[in-house]
Image: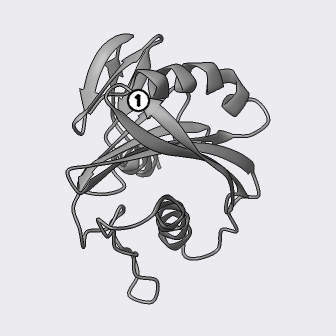
Amino acid sequence: MKKISILALACMLAACAHYSLAPEGAHTVQGMSFVSTTDWNKSSLRSGAKSEVWTKDGERLNQLTFIGGIKDGQTIFTSRSKELPMPEFRANMLPNELMELVVTSLKNSSGGELVIDATNLRPQRLQGSIGFRFDMSYYDSNGLARRADCIMVKKDDRLNLIIFSAAGMHYYPKEAAEVDSIFSSLQL
Protein backbone atom coordinates (compact mmCIF):
# COMPACT_ATOMS: atom_id res chain seq x y z
CA MET A 1 0.00 0.00 0.00
CA LYS A 2 2.83 2.39 0.86
CA LYS A 3 4.46 1.75 -2.56
CA ILE A 4 1.20 2.60 -4.34
CA SER A 5 0.90 5.89 -2.42
CA ILE A 6 4.47 6.88 -3.24
CA LEU A 7 3.96 5.97 -6.90
CA ALA A 8 0.71 7.99 -7.05
CA LEU A 9 2.44 11.01 -5.47
CA ALA A 10 5.33 10.76 -7.93
CA CYS A 11 2.92 10.66 -10.87
CA MET A 12 1.03 13.72 -9.59
CA LEU A 13 4.26 15.69 -9.13
CA ALA A 14 5.43 14.79 -12.63
CA ALA A 15 2.23 16.28 -14.09
CA CYS A 16 2.66 19.59 -12.25
CA ALA A 17 4.20 22.69 -13.69
CA HIS A 18 7.58 23.84 -12.51
CA TYR A 19 8.11 27.46 -11.53
CA SER A 20 10.98 29.92 -11.32
CA LEU A 21 10.90 33.42 -9.89
CA ALA A 22 10.44 36.44 -12.18
CA PRO A 23 11.36 39.21 -9.73
CA GLU A 24 10.02 42.73 -10.04
CA GLY A 25 11.94 44.86 -12.52
CA ALA A 26 12.75 44.98 -16.22
CA HIS A 27 12.14 41.87 -18.33
CA THR A 28 12.21 40.81 -21.97
CA VAL A 29 9.91 37.91 -22.86
CA GLN A 30 9.30 36.69 -26.41
CA GLY A 31 10.83 39.92 -27.78
CA MET A 32 8.67 42.19 -25.62
CA SER A 33 10.32 44.40 -23.00
CA PHE A 34 8.40 45.68 -19.98
CA VAL A 35 8.68 46.46 -16.29
CA SER A 36 6.83 44.55 -13.57
CA THR A 37 6.34 46.19 -10.19
CA THR A 38 5.86 42.92 -8.30
CA ASP A 39 7.26 39.39 -8.37
CA TRP A 40 5.70 36.75 -10.64
CA ASN A 41 6.35 33.05 -11.18
CA LYS A 42 7.41 31.73 -14.58
CA SER A 43 5.62 28.48 -15.35
CA SER A 44 6.99 25.58 -17.36
CA LEU A 45 3.58 25.27 -19.06
CA ARG A 46 3.34 26.56 -22.63
CA SER A 47 0.33 27.25 -24.84
CA GLY A 48 2.46 27.36 -27.99
CA ALA A 49 6.02 27.34 -29.26
CA LYS A 50 6.34 31.12 -28.94
CA SER A 51 4.71 31.56 -25.56
CA GLU A 52 5.61 31.94 -21.91
CA VAL A 53 3.19 31.83 -18.98
CA TRP A 54 3.57 33.71 -15.70
CA THR A 55 1.34 33.43 -12.65
CA LYS A 56 1.03 34.72 -9.12
CA ASP A 57 -1.24 32.10 -7.58
CA GLY A 58 -1.31 29.24 -10.12
CA GLU A 59 -2.57 29.13 -13.70
CA ARG A 60 -6.15 28.26 -12.75
CA LEU A 61 -6.43 31.47 -10.70
CA ASN A 62 -4.41 33.92 -12.77
CA GLN A 63 -2.03 33.85 -15.68
CA LEU A 64 -0.14 36.29 -17.83
CA THR A 65 0.58 34.73 -21.22
CA PHE A 66 3.21 36.28 -23.48
CA ILE A 67 3.08 35.33 -27.17
CA GLY A 68 5.61 36.93 -29.48
CA GLY A 69 6.80 36.96 -33.06
CA ILE A 70 3.86 35.18 -34.69
CA LYS A 71 4.48 35.25 -38.46
CA ASP A 72 1.95 35.35 -41.27
CA GLY A 73 0.34 31.90 -41.54
CA GLN A 74 1.22 30.82 -37.98
CA THR A 75 -1.19 30.20 -35.12
CA ILE A 76 -1.20 31.77 -31.67
CA PHE A 77 -1.65 28.47 -29.83
CA THR A 78 -0.70 24.91 -30.67
CA SER A 79 -3.65 23.02 -32.15
CA ARG A 80 -4.93 20.15 -30.02
CA SER A 81 -7.70 18.95 -32.31
CA LYS A 82 -8.19 18.30 -36.02
CA GLU A 83 -11.87 19.10 -35.59
CA LEU A 84 -11.10 22.56 -34.16
CA PRO A 85 -8.03 23.84 -35.98
CA MET A 86 -6.43 27.04 -34.81
CA PRO A 87 -7.00 30.09 -36.98
CA GLU A 88 -3.92 31.55 -38.64
CA PHE A 89 -2.56 35.04 -38.23
CA ARG A 90 -2.42 37.17 -41.36
CA ALA A 91 -0.16 40.22 -41.44
CA ASN A 92 -2.90 42.35 -43.07
CA MET A 93 -5.52 41.69 -40.35
CA LEU A 94 -7.40 44.68 -38.96
CA PRO A 95 -7.67 45.21 -35.18
CA ASN A 96 -11.19 43.70 -35.00
CA GLU A 97 -9.96 40.65 -36.94
CA LEU A 98 -7.04 40.28 -34.55
CA MET A 99 -9.46 40.38 -31.62
CA GLU A 100 -11.52 37.63 -33.27
CA LEU A 101 -8.31 35.64 -33.90
CA VAL A 102 -7.52 35.71 -30.17
CA VAL A 103 -11.10 34.84 -29.15
CA THR A 104 -11.37 31.93 -31.61
CA SER A 105 -7.93 30.64 -30.62
CA LEU A 106 -8.90 30.64 -26.93
CA LYS A 107 -12.21 28.97 -27.71
CA ASN A 108 -10.63 26.27 -29.87
CA SER A 109 -7.88 25.60 -27.32
CA SER A 110 -10.61 24.66 -24.83
CA GLY A 111 -12.41 22.25 -27.14
CA GLY A 112 -14.81 24.88 -28.48
CA GLU A 113 -16.80 25.01 -25.26
CA LEU A 114 -16.08 28.57 -24.14
CA VAL A 115 -18.45 31.40 -24.90
CA ILE A 116 -16.25 34.47 -24.80
CA ASP A 117 -17.59 38.01 -24.70
CA ALA A 118 -14.94 40.35 -26.16
CA THR A 119 -15.55 44.08 -25.76
CA ASN A 120 -13.97 47.52 -25.58
CA LEU A 121 -11.49 47.26 -28.47
CA ARG A 122 -9.38 50.40 -28.25
CA PRO A 123 -5.99 51.76 -29.33
CA GLN A 124 -3.18 51.64 -26.78
CA ARG A 125 -0.19 53.93 -27.14
CA LEU A 126 3.03 52.09 -26.41
CA GLN A 127 6.67 53.08 -26.24
CA GLY A 128 7.40 53.63 -29.93
CA SER A 129 4.27 52.08 -31.45
CA ILE A 130 0.51 51.76 -31.30
CA GLY A 131 -1.21 48.58 -30.21
CA PHE A 132 -4.75 47.56 -29.45
CA ARG A 133 -6.32 46.36 -26.26
CA PHE A 134 -9.61 44.65 -25.43
CA ASP A 135 -11.44 42.96 -22.57
CA MET A 136 -12.92 39.47 -22.37
CA SER A 137 -15.19 37.63 -19.98
CA TYR A 138 -16.23 33.98 -19.95
CA TYR A 139 -16.88 30.96 -17.75
CA ASP A 140 -14.18 28.29 -17.81
CA SER A 141 -14.91 24.56 -18.10
CA ASN A 142 -15.39 24.37 -14.30
CA GLY A 143 -17.97 27.18 -14.31
CA LEU A 144 -15.61 29.77 -12.83
CA ALA A 145 -16.28 33.32 -14.05
CA ARG A 146 -13.10 34.71 -15.58
CA ARG A 147 -12.07 38.09 -16.87
CA ALA A 148 -9.24 38.80 -19.28
CA ASP A 149 -7.36 41.75 -20.68
CA CYS A 150 -5.41 41.48 -23.93
CA ILE A 151 -2.93 43.78 -25.61
CA MET A 152 -1.75 43.08 -29.16
CA VAL A 153 0.82 44.81 -31.34
CA LYS A 154 1.90 44.15 -34.90
CA LYS A 155 5.50 45.00 -35.71
CA ASP A 156 7.38 44.01 -38.86
CA ASP A 157 4.33 41.94 -39.93
CA ARG A 158 4.56 39.84 -36.75
CA LEU A 159 1.97 39.64 -34.00
CA ASN A 160 2.90 40.09 -30.35
CA LEU A 161 0.37 39.85 -27.56
CA ILE A 162 -0.07 39.50 -23.84
CA ILE A 163 -3.21 38.01 -22.33
CA PHE A 164 -3.97 38.39 -18.63
CA SER A 165 -6.71 36.00 -17.50
CA ALA A 166 -7.91 35.50 -13.93
CA ALA A 167 -10.83 34.47 -11.77
CA GLY A 168 -13.15 37.47 -11.97
CA MET A 169 -14.23 37.83 -8.36
CA HIS A 170 -10.89 38.30 -6.61
CA TYR A 171 -7.79 37.59 -8.66
CA TYR A 172 -8.56 39.81 -11.66
CA PRO A 173 -9.12 43.02 -9.67
CA LYS A 174 -6.20 42.13 -7.37
CA GLU A 175 -3.70 42.21 -10.26
CA ALA A 176 -5.42 44.67 -12.66
CA ALA A 177 -3.23 47.67 -11.70
CA GLU A 178 -0.02 45.62 -12.06
CA VAL A 179 -1.11 44.31 -15.47
CA ASP A 180 -2.05 47.83 -16.60
CA SER A 181 1.45 48.98 -15.55
CA ILE A 182 3.07 46.12 -17.51
CA PHE A 183 0.98 46.95 -20.59
CA SER A 184 1.85 50.65 -20.32
CA SER A 185 5.60 49.94 -20.13
CA LEU A 186 5.56 47.50 -23.08
CA GLN A 187 8.20 48.00 -25.80
CA LEU A 188 9.03 45.91 -28.84
Q: Residue sitting at 58 percent across and 76 percent down?
A: 112
Q: Provide the residue designation for mark 1.
A: 126
Q: Nearer the viewer, residue 100 or 3?
A: 100
Which quadrant would residue 128 be assigned to in this image?
top left
Above-or-below relation of 56 to 147: above
In the picture, measured across the screen, residue 78 lies left or right of residue 141, that is left
Q: Nearer the viewer, residue 35 or 46?
A: 35
Above-or-below relation of 110 to 131: below
Q: Nearer the viewer, residue 127 or 32?
A: 127
Q: As drawn, which residue projects farthest toward the bottom? A: 83
Quarter of the image with the C terminus is: top left
Q: Residue sitting at 62 percent across and 38 percent down?
A: 61
Q: Nearer the viewer, residue 99 or 107?
A: 99
SS at badge 1: strand
Q: Residue sitting at 30 percent across and 57 percent down?
A: 48
* Residue 78, x across and y down, in percent: 32, 66
Residue 2 visible in the snapshot? no
* Residue 179, x across and y down, in percent: 54, 26
Question: Badge 1, how many Cα within 10 Å: few under 14, some, many 20+?
Answer: some
Give the residue type at disc 1. Answer: Leu
Q: As drawn, which residue projects farthest toward the right? A: 169
Which quadrant would residue 53 be assigned to in this image?
top left
Which quadrant would residue 94 be assigned to in this image?
bottom left
* Residue 122, x across and y down, in percent: 60, 45
Q: Residue sitting at 60 percent across and 47 percent down?
A: 134
* Residue 167, x across and y down, in percent: 69, 40
